[in-house]
Amino acid sequence: MTPLTRRDVLFGLGGGIAGTLLSPLPWTVLDDVAIWTQHRRALPIPRDGETSVRPVACTSCPAGCSLRVRSVAGRPVFVSGEASHPLGGGACPFGLTLHHLAHHPLRLTTPVRLDAHGTPTRVALGAAVAAAAGALRAASRSGRAVLVLDQRPGRAVSRAFRELLAAVPYGLYATPDGEGATLQVLSGAAGGPLGIDLEHTRTLLSFGAPVLEGWGRPGRMLALRDRLRIVQLDAWRSPTAGLADEWLAIRPGSEGPLALALANVLVGEGLARTPAAELRDLLASFPPERVEPLAGLPASAIETLARSLAAQGPTVAIGGGDPGGGPLPLDAERAIAWLDVVLGSVGRAGGLVARGSLPDDGTAPLAPETSLAEVPDGDVRLLVIAAGDSGRALPWSALGRKLAPQALVVSLSPFRCGLTARADLVVPSPAPLEGHEEILPTADACVMSYAVTAPLLPPCAESVEPTRFLAELARAAGLGVPSDGTHAERLQRRAAAIFASHRGRVLVRGDEGFREEAPADAGAFWQALLEGGCWVDDSRAARAVAAPALPSPAAVAGWLRAEPARSDLPLVSFAARGAAGGTPPSPILTKLYQETALRPSVATIALHPQTARERGLVDGREMRVVSAAGRLDARLRCDPTLPPGRAAMAAGPDPAALHEQDAAPARGALALGVVEPDLTWRGTRVAITEA
Ligand code: SF4
């Protein structure tokens, strides 16, 4: 087992709160925050007044952690995790500083137009809607696409987007691949959603997923950690690798062949069910000895691991990638999914189990959901970036390549950072704590659930609920999509449909904790949700074993091809969930990460000391880092825990997020990412020389 250090624990917690308490706080942090707060009301300054405590949820990423917010005179001053929440208590530092975000320097409070440098100019909502409607009509005339990118699918507002797109001649509704990618492969084959019965899983085999840092619902992982064996296959000593029971350092890009080699051992030694001939033939090409140089792991280690997965089952293997490193290629996810099938983990307790869907609450036709990678390049005349954050990075070039000439990009985010910094128009939605939000289950959850967080703060006068923007856009473009009420009314209708389904149980939040209760009617159910309660669906019976598609022949051939020796290095890109998406971390956390070693900064590039020595590079010096997509300067950080022969760099948080005048395109690994047609950027290679 990898020795656990104090730094790992801080790292694993995201560093923020624990780091503040346990580390000497650098004076520069206090100094900068003091200067900064002289210029704007950036930190909540409590007035005298009545103290109240309200339940809310964090929506900076899909985990939707439950929080308690203490307010003085209506102003939030302190946030803590809702420890006894039935869906898992606890939160990461980004959630515990959520109340800073309404005052963030990059907060937008009116619709704006951004110029090529990202400088905002205020525009009227009517003008923004007219511009979007003009682009929508131009798209219809020219046969181009109207694309909505939704990074938090499944919400009532997602449904509103899909209704609008169904009324457009060429409307596309796309979602990026996320941490549930392996489950998606298996769910597609199983004919319905699957989750992980983690409460009965014995071994979790993670192919680079940050399962102990920001994955699923952190409270659930925390509660299960003691009885769950975690094996991390990772290209660097990530926070999860440091905290796992076992970390095997693998070569970047070897996830697919390694999954097949593990399946090869299991089948070859009779430790798994005999697969169909087609898979057997495929596995025969991936014996451990052949995968040894690909994965950078001795064949004996692959064999030992495979045997332990069978002996210490039920085992679940998952991919999904890192929030800053992006998704794994689909073929690697298919290989991991097949490892689950070979392990007999699909459709069994402790494995991958069927999960219900939310009861339907509408009849209007919906545009189908598609993967962003499937949207043709150069085809999008109007792009709408929906409000709602995945907390994961997406390089601008992954979206930019989809745009047609003269395309208009409209973002509905309340913050001028991430992808929004590249939009033409921003119509800000309410900031965290200012609007009604839905909390849906995370990708791994084994039962469907539903919760709502009610506004704690009044929205600023010119922020616009996305459903209102859509209704005005439909009206201006003459689409004839009936307006289906306000955002809150849509949520209420969804809650009524859940109540009418008579499924599951309702857990009401009271002074003594949560208790099961049967609300008298849909109105009482809605009220229970607003007061911090939640609905949890019934468990589903196991579903038949899924047979996903095999990895493509091209991918298999690529895995088996000997790689020529190269002087450039594979780049390992990483970030914490919540620190690389479209919601900036609290300025205090950003500053803390900039001024301490708790989390590697985007301004440094790491190499193993031996790799640096071989290249004549000196620790601490400024380096010029060049990829096929860009170049930047970064300070060399020699890191003996990083395996030789690779470079590692953070993709967030972006230090520019602290200063309005610095809202430039993100630096760090995202600026270097070479985005492939499947929208992965894990194959990026970099050349490093002294600047
Ligand atoms: S950022 Fe995500 S993991 Fe962190 S508190 Fe918010 S919802 Fe939870």
Image (cartoon, rainbow, N blue to C red):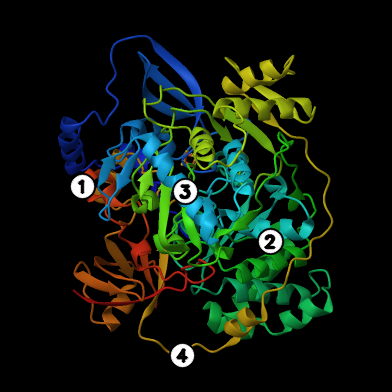
Query: What residue did someone put label 2 on?
Result: 185
Q: Residues within 10 Å of mark 2 (few under 14, many from 20)?
A: many
Taking the image as shown, residue 687 lies to the left or right of residue 476, namely left
* Snapshot quadrant of residue 297: bottom right
Query: What residue did someone put label 1 on?
Result: 661
Query: What residue did someone put label 3 on?
Result: 385
Foreground disc of the pair 2, 4: 2
Position in image of residue 516 (x %, y %):
71, 21
Residue type marked 2: Val
Query: What residue did someone put label 4 on?
Result: 564
Number of the label disc, if any, that sits on residue 633:
none
Taking the image as shown, residue 626 lies to the left or right of residue 259, namely left
Q: Earlier in the sequence, mark 4 or mark 3?
A: 3
- How many discs appear? 4
Dots 4, 3 in contact, CB < 8 A: no
Cα distance, mark 2 to mark 4? 32 Å
Local secondary structure at mark 1 = helix
